[in-house]
Image: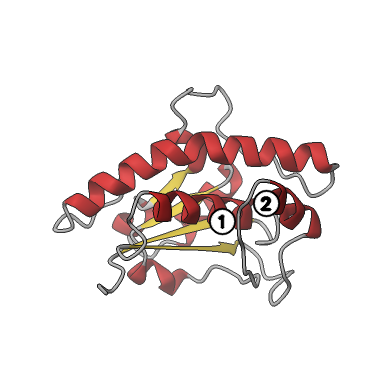
Amino acid sequence: MRVPSFRVCFVCTGNICRSPIAEAVFRARVEEAGLGDLVTVDSAGTGGWHEGDGADRRALAVLTENDYELDHTAREFQPDWFDELDLVIALDGEHLSTLRDLAPTPEDAAKVRLLRSYDPSEPDDLDVPDPYYGGMDHFHECLEMVESASEGLLDAVRAAVADLGVRAAV
């Protein structure tokens, strides 16, 4: 088995709702595409408020309802991770700004992208709203947004993996 060579990390605020949902969905897409031995999928939060906790029970419920698997422990994104990551996927504009500010170099800042920028439907609003303070319908909406953008992201990652000599953000 080959060592994974392309690394993607999804980032939201506390790493208990949006980014774990995105991690589970995208990992499933990567596996379905036969890229599981080439792509590593992970997630983190911009803050450490929930570090060590599992995903929000509602996030887990919506994932389970839709046949996604997730074994998750929340953690805070660290700037030195940029060295090991090929793509850092922010779930909203605030995360995008925070992550780019944390980036040690302009090349690292260029690795940070908004998830919904990969959505082929080209939504007007590129943020995935935080479902934490809402009901289950907000978690379902979050999942729908993540699923919609994941296909475009998979296409970009597939292209980058096909040309592993190019280690730039896709």
Rendering coords of residue 122 (x, y %): 47, 23
Rendering coords of residue 163 (x, y %): 16, 52
SS at badge 1: helix
Query: Which numbered disc, 1 or 2, marks the residue that appears first in the sequence?
Result: 1
The image quarter in which residue 34 lies:
bottom left
Above or below, 167 against 82 in this view is above
What is the three-letter code of the residue carrying label 1? Answer: Ala
Q: In this view, does 16 lie to the left or right of 32?
A: right
> Callout 1 environment at 10 Å: few (<14), some (14 to 19), or many (20+)?
many
Q: Which residue is drawn at 69% across and 74% down?
A: 51
Of all residues, the one furthest to the bottom in this rendering is 52
Q: Which residue is drawn at 25% across and 72% down?
A: 2
Kindly identify which residue carries mark 2: 63
What is the three-letter code of the residue carrying label 2? Answer: Leu
Label drawn at residue 24: 1
- Front residue of 124 and 148: 148
Q: In this view, does 130 lie to the left or right of 40?
A: right
Q: Are marks 1 and 2 in contact (CB under 8 Å)?
A: yes
Q: Is residue 24 left or right of residue 106?
A: right
Q: Residue at x 66, y 56 (%)?
A: 13
